[in-house]
Image (tube, rainbow, N blue to C red):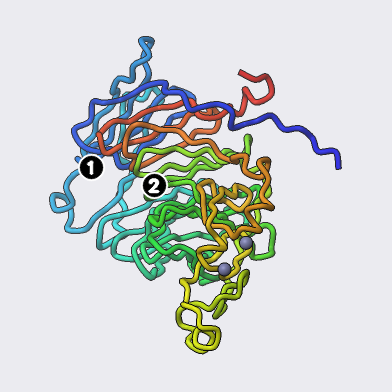
Amino acid sequence: MAAEIQPQPQARKPCLLSKIDAFQEVVSTAVIIPKEDGVISVSEDRTIRVWLKRDSGQYWPSIYHTMPCSDQLSPLPLFQEFVLSEDYNKMTPARTYQAHQGRVTVVLFVLEMEWLLSTGQDKNFTWHCSESGQLLGTYRTAAWVSGLQFDVETRHAFVGDQSGQVTILKLEQDLCSLVTTFKGHTGNVTALCWDPVTRVLFSGSSDHSIIMWDIGGRKGTAIELQGHNDKVQGLCYASHTRQLISCSSDGSIVIWNMDVTRQETPEWLDSDSCQKCEQPFFWNFKQMWDSKKIGLRQHHCRKCGQAVCGKCSSKRSTIPLMGFEFEVRVCDSCHESISDEDRAPTATFHDSKHSIVYMHYEPTTGNLLTSGTDKIVKVWKSTRSVCCLETGW
Ligand SMILES: [Zn+2]
Ligand SMILES: [Zn+2]
């Protein structure tokens, strides 16, 4: 099969463009304004700021607004809608939503539906009409929600929560029905990212892993991506370069080449003895007695899933095509079957040099924003932008 040679999209390293370090508190949410080279930030001290890049290359604040404390205006946490003037010099409050009894965790605006989806620590998922301000519906989630995505075409909401599951809800104008739940993480879901083109959902977790749920493939394929050593804090998909960008609280940014076809990891097999050398595992008293052998500890080969003893799985290998960018335990025969070519990484690893709490990616410029516990916001050139993809840069 003559495969078309794709340009290596991950060859480029994120390059730091600017730093904004004038914050009193950690920035919990921020977005890049694509056309103006601006940034909107919301920090823990309840201030919203709009920053514009000046000729000097530095970002300067153009607007500063402090949200009222919840007890000043009302006893309930709220979120507010603002209209930003075209010159970015004025921010006018437009509407206030009182949707939750606890801290608001995620707000998502769906322009096509004129819906505002929100979740809070009160475990409620709500959706409002942004035109009328009217509450359309509420759904109670299993735990408080930390990731929220929406598919406009099928009106499915993906809700990732602190229990580690992802709930898929079908939304009608004022009705919500449970479609299914995805369970795969052993820690909280910390980030979700939906690509409507390939119909793939990515979930990141405090268990350090990312799971790629292939909904479009309709085969129930879920592929684990192991490339972080700490809590995954953000996920963004660059569909024009087919790259997944993920970040973790240890400051690492991983850019995954999603052009690669990866395989699912096998189920771990159960056995009372090593499936290679047939020596009994320690709970297999009968065989231990019969053969006068000492019982061994059970391990599993990450490639074939067989139950093996330590001696038959003494080697380690990365298996990038199964999502393992770090070395994992493999049995000796699988180790022999993995070629150097198979070990070629399918992701690149970068150090942002701050502990990331939030990440935002802007596809038209290819710029990436990271916010850290150091109260600094960094803007990076991370991937090819949509317009430069053809010409190269
Ligand atoms: Zn063995
Ligand atoms: Zn094996």
> x%, y% of residue 365?
53, 26
The furthest residue to the left: 72
Residues packed near mark 1 inside 10 Å, few (<14), some (14 to 19) or many (20 plus): some
Tell whether 119 sits left or right of 325.
Answer: left
Q: Camera-side residue: 163 or 4?
A: 4
> x%, y% of residue 377?
33, 30
> x%, y% of residue 22?
23, 26
Instruction: Write the residue at 54% across / 56% down.
Output: 224
Could you say which quadrant of the image residue 30 lies in?
top left
Gap in angstroms between the C-alphas marked 1 and 2? 17 Å
Could you say which quadrant of the image residue 77 lies in?
bottom left
In this rendering, the answer to whether 103 lies above or below 363 is below
Q: Camera-side residue: 242 or 114?
A: 242
Q: Camera-side residue: 66 or 201?
A: 201
**Which quadrant contains ligand 1?**
bottom right
Tell whether 352 sits left or right of 197.
Answer: left
Instruction: Write the residue at 18% across / 55% down.
Output: 74
Q: Is residue 383 visible?
A: yes
In this rendering, the answer to whether 280 lies above or below 324 is below
In this rendering, the answer to whether 24 lies above or below 312 is above
Report which residue position mark 1 lands on.
44
Inspect the image, locate mark 2, and give the three-letter code of the amino acid beneath it: Gln
Q: Comparing marks 1 and 2, which lies closer to the viewer?
A: 2
Report which residue position mark 2 lands on.
233
Q: Camera-side residue: 205 or 314?
A: 314
> x%, y% of residue 358?
36, 41
Q: Secondary structure at mark 1?
A: loop
Residues packed near mark 2 inside 10 Å, few (<14), some (14 to 19) or many (20 plus): many
Q: Secondary structure at mark 2?
A: strand
Inspect the image, locate mark 1, and give the three-letter code of the amino acid beneath it: Glu
